[in-house]
Amino acid sequence: MNDMMNIPEDNQTSLERVLCYLQGKTPQRIACFPLILNHAARVLGIPIGEYNRNPELMGKAHIAAYRRYGNDLVLIFSTTSTLAEAMGTKLAFFDEDAPQIDVPLIQELDDIKKVIIPDFSRDGRLPCYLEATEMAVQEIGAETCVSTVFAGPLTTAAALRPIELFVRDLHRNKERVHELLEICTQSGIMFIDEILKRNSLPIIVEPIGTGSLISPRHFREFVTPYLKRMADHIHAHGSGMPAVLHICGNSRPNWKPMLEADWNIWSIDSPVDIGEAREIAGSHVCLVGNLTTTNLLKGTSAQIDEEARVICEKAMGSPGGFILGSGCEVPFDTPPENIDALILAARKYGRFDQ
Amino acid sequence: MDPKERTAVITSLVCGFLGAGKTTFIKGRLKRSKERTAVLVNEFGILGMDGDEIGESRSLKVVEMPGGCICCSQSENLADAIRDIVRQIRPDRLLIEPSGVAEASSVIRVLQGIEDIQLESVVTIVDAHTFLEDIQPHAFGSFFMDQLINADTILINKIDRVSADTLDAIESEILNVNESALIFPVCFGSPDLVLPQAMRAVLKESIFMSREFDSMSMTLFCPLGEAQLNAFETKLKTGEFGNIVRAKGIFNTAGGGKKALQYARGNLSIEETASSISARLTLIGFCLERKNLEEFFKKGVAFESL
């Protein structure tokens, strides 16, 4: 009770808080980005399977989640395979789970010629994402930062091909991989344009770029150049929006080639130490993270508070900026009070007004 | 420490990259298993089980768990899937085949947090034909090494496709990263497959594994003394534990120290060790008699007085 009484009420909206980072100003307190993705369906009380296929429900779910939690970033997203789906990979859908890859398009390498650059008004569930984005921007875009999330070129390519074959292709069929990455980059850049048109922030996720899957050498060859093109495009056409990249898992081995891709904000996962990220990358990027998602799902509010306190202790004052967040997607069934605890922790430990 | 109660389902993790032979290994175990076995696989349709392959009078449940984002939130899906299998199907045994690019250590961490199961063994299968290319430092991310480092049994499969020198090189590379695992060359091919003459000359023991090959690991909770080790060697030779081809382990002695044991080509050798690995025994062979082994090693020092 005493703690709560000592925490000042927020005197900025979510959007004002986030804009401080872009404008080089100090906010009242750090922003907080619980990565609420499919969990939004729980807030609206609808099955995940309906959330991720119905644009109106997807938009309403994220609006409801923002109204409930006050998260400083809204993320329109359902699965990392959405762009690949529009380009030809078949997904399987479930009532209470995110869609999963069922049949990748490229079973033989020559199938690369079947890959299409999608029509964003028609293919896969891209229209669903874009309509949900429009809804969210219209309803809450003046209060909080709305973003639209999709997978980067490597992850999209890996969703177009069976993953183990793709990982092997990186050292056995380099030219074909580059051919595929080029198509995925072009598609991704076009998607960025569609997102920017709707005044939403494009966020790219590259989980396949994690250190457990690909080596730093392969990251530099197959990820950096394509991610850099996307970052450059956002810088050139985003009207000052930052380039925001999320890589899950143990991204640490690939931080050096990641820096070369010129992204402004890194959202990092709990297996890495945010203190070390600050040392290595903190002068170049704003860091977001990195509360353990299983803690969010199964921990107590006190445990979440303590983990967040330690993260803030390590990352507050990072030269490029720091935003407290979940290390990866907030699990579907996270107790709402645990997300509240994370945001409360940002208000407690992330203040600049003392 | 007391052994975990047997109500926990004995579980094996079978790891390996694309084409190493994980699925063939699992099918083989299922075909000859006398127990109700559940299999959890990471991808759709990967096992393609049919009546012939399953064999007769087996109660088998294959649970396919789609991959999704391989990094993070899937750990809870995996844990939930396992709890569901154990509580609803109640198998005697659980085999888990994660994605070929999964880090074994991440999966093991999840499994160790599930009370309903007891992780008995981690088997990693490698493809002899591609291994020396795959183990190059920049070929893959850390998953490949992680699967080797965390295995207690490493099977070098498809040895019919490599020379004896290549096999030596493979074993040497594996020992560099995991010196405590039991490493064994296998060939999960047709029983009629004939090895090149040069290979047969080098490998003096029978290494043709159709699908009858099996492996198990167990924690050795009790210290072992000389009498019990002698009895162990006798029973290995008489077949009371099955047809054991190779065994390797670390055990505690009554005096509080540790020793290493190896069984190969019909001989048991014991030597001093400075290893800090906890007491464990891994065995490979045919028709392993698990219950006999577990009963035997429960006796421990008390054996000395028998």
Image (spheres, coloured by chain):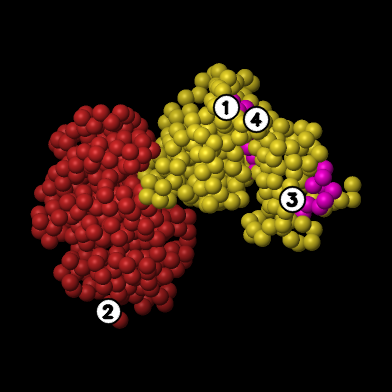
Mark 2: few/some/many CA within 10 Å (<14, 14-19, 20+): few
Q: Which residue is mark 2?
A: A353
Mark 1: few/some/many CA within 10 Å (<14, 14-19, 20+): few
Query: What is the letter of the red chain?
Result: A
Specify the subunit that label 4 lies on. Answer: B
- Residue type pointed to by label 3: Ile
Q: Nearer the viewer, residue A126 or B99?
A: B99
Q: Which residue is mark 4?
A: B206
Q: Classify mark 3: helix, strand or loop.
A: strand
Specify the subunit that label 3 lies on. Answer: B
Q: CA distance from mark 1 to mark 4?
A: 13 Å
- Residue type pointed to by label 1: Gln
Query: What is the letter of the yellow chain?
Result: B
Q: Is residue B1 magenta?
A: no
Look at the image and give the residue range highlighted in magenta: B208-231
Expressed as whole percent of the image width and height from the top left, the position of residue A340 reads 37, 61
Q: Residue at x 30, y 81 (%)?
A: A354
Expressed as whole percent of the image width and height from the top left, the position of residue A78 reads 30, 44
Label 3 close to label 1 by CB (< 8 Å): no
The answer to whether residue A167 is above or below residue B89 is below
Q: Are marks 2 and 4 on the same chain?
A: no
* Picture disc at residue B197: 1
A48 left or right of B278 in image:
left
Mark 4: few/some/many CA within 10 Å (<14, 14-19, 20+): few
Q: Are marks 3 and 1 on the same chain?
A: yes
Q: Is residue B215 magenta?
A: yes
Expressed as whole percent of the image width and height from the top left, the position of residue A19 reads 18, 66
Q: CA distance from mark 3 to mark 1?
A: 32 Å
Q: Are marks 3 and 2 on the same chain?
A: no
The reply to whether residue A253 is visible in this rendering is: yes
Q: CA distance from mark 2 to mark 4?
A: 75 Å
